[in-house]
Each structure stands twice: as structure tokens, then as C-alpha cells.
Amino acid sequence: MTWAGKSLRSMHGWLLLGSMFFVSGAQGAQTAGAAQGEGDSPVSAEEASVSSGPADMPARVPSLSSQIWGDHTDVSLSLLVGAGPSYMGSRDTQRAVGAFFGISRGIFFLDDRGIGVQYGSDDGLMASLSIGADPGRSEKKSSVAGRPGSERLKGMGTIRSATTANLALSVPVTDWLALTGAAEFRVHGAQRGNTFHAGFDVAALDTDSDQITVGLKAHGGNQRYNALFFGVTPQQAQTSRFSAFETKSGLHAYSLEAGWNHVLDRHWSITGGVEAMRMASRAAKSPIVEKRTGVSGFVGVNYQF
């Protein structure tokens, strides 16, 4: 969820997904409570069996097609502003404004994560698979909004954008704690490697109007990924101000992050997030890493149609 690696788009997506992990279980309970009614008394087992029909009649199960396709379409629009390091390890700051559109129906979605499918259970288990894009990195201040880049990387060459297959999983441990994991695999883009993330999220606050999630993550990559973003080849050393540097696969950073969502009404909500990322392991020794700890943040407004 780094600003440098994924910019405003990804940071918003990860924090939004993290909050969804905790509210999904609560929504199931709220729906059941609403069906009973605020002023109604509890329904006894005998009354339930009468109202639902003969005891030997099985409960109606939604058809497979309705579970997959759903019965309605959700559409949302977000406007966000944020700032963070110009690239992973940069001492410079990059600012951006972004507008993001999201649409989902049944298990299908299209939003800042990409296009894909997702599953969420009433107890909070969530999983998603999507096809998205990595913006790469420029060797100068990028003219593409939110794309990492800095003049200090001159001579390093441009890391071209790539298409990735993204997996995300959240497994609830308690009502307030969930274990999370994610991976991004290169689908198209010969330069890029694969990256992995693991950690946990804590629901610090979960009410009808406010959700606050705090998480701790570890980030790693295979040799190709780490070499691309933290290594310096002998050829790059000749054309840039950096000395040659070799990397290997493994951990490259830790991050502490927090997200907040405040619901104003059935359409409008306010959202925000902050992340502190600390470069680690051999990546922290890379000559292109000028500052080991970088802080990113954003605020925005969401409209649900």
C-alpha cells in the first residue's frame, strides 16, 4: 500500500478494503435484526417453524445465478487528495488529486483495485481476485498524476507500467482482529516481478457512523521486483549518480497504517488514511533509498449512488 509503489489509488483501495473486512460481518447481523424489527419481541422456535412452513420443507436457498450476479448494482464516486514520498525511499514529496469510480454487482467489481471478483461471508472472511495495473516509475517528475518519479533518479531509466493479477485475503480471528495477505503477480510487463504483503488489521472503532482500522504489514518481493525498484545495474551506475547495487528476494519494508471512514448519510461519507513505511533488510541499504521512513496520507469524500 505504498504511496510510491501504488500512489493514491492503491492506498485508498487497501484502506477501503480493510474497513470492508470488519463491516461485512456486522452487516449480516444488522440485516437479521432489521428483519425482526426494532420493537418486536423475539420469535420462538415454535413460531418460527409455523411461519416458515412445514418442518420438513427445506429453507429456500438463493439460486447460484443470483448469488453470482446479485440483485442490484452499487455505484460510487470518490474524490481524494493526498501526499507522500515521490518513490519508495525518496526524501522528496509528491502530491496528487484523484477521482475514482467504483461499480459492483454480485461477486463482480470494477474500481481502483482493477476489474475482478470478490467474496465476503457473514463472519467477515473476504477474498478477491482482480486484474489491475502498476504505474511503474519515472526517472523524472512524472506528468502522469500519481505516478512515482523524481529528477533524482535521472539516468536510472523509466520502469514501464505493467499489468498484474492481484490476490487479497482477510481471515477474521476475532470481532476486532483479522489476518491479511495479498500478492501481485506480473501478467504483462517484462521488467516487473512479483510482490507480497502480509499482516493484520485491528478494528479500533466500528459504529454505524464511524469505522477506524489500524494495521501492521510486511512487504516483500521476488528478486526481479526488488532488483527493479531498489537495485542499480552497472549500466545504470554509469548513467546515474548511484553506485552499482545488487539485491535479492525477500522483505523490503514494514508499514503501520490507519484508515477512517465517517458516514454522513446514505449517500455521502468522508474517508482518510495515513501510512508510515520503514524500508528494511537489504533494500534499506540501496543507494536510491535516501530516507528509510516515509509517511503518506490522504483525505477524501465518497458518494454512493
Image (cartoon, helix red, strand yellow):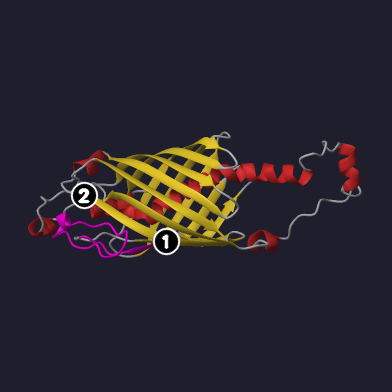
81 left or right of 105? left
**Location of residue 266 in the rendering, given as x and y in whole percent from the top left corner:** 60, 53
Of the numbered discs 1 and 2, the one sitting upstream in the chain is 2
Q: Is the magenta stretch mostly helix, strand or loop?
A: loop
The span shown in magenta is 141-164
169 inside magenta stretch: no
Quarter holding the C terminus is bottom right
Q: Distance between the residues labelled 1 and 2?
A: 23 Å
Dot 2 amino acid type: Asp
Residue occupied by mark 1 = 99
- Residue indicated by mark 2: 92
Q: In this view, does 36 lie to the left or right of 51?
A: left
Measured from the top left, where is residue 85 in percent x and y?
Answer: 26, 49
Residue sitting at 46 percent across and 58 percent down?
Answer: 78
Q: Which one is in front, 81 or 218? A: 81
Q: Do the CB atoms of the residues marked 1 and 2 lie less than 8 Å apart?
A: no
Residue depicted at 60% across the width and 46% down the height: 24
Between 153 and 297, the one lying in front of the other is 297
Q: In this view, does 228 lie to the left or right of 169?
A: left
Name the residue: 67% across, 45% down: 28
The answer to if 158 sits in the magenta stretch is: yes
Q: Nearer the viewer, residue 156 or 4?
A: 4
Amino acid type of the residue tagged 1 in the rendering: Ala
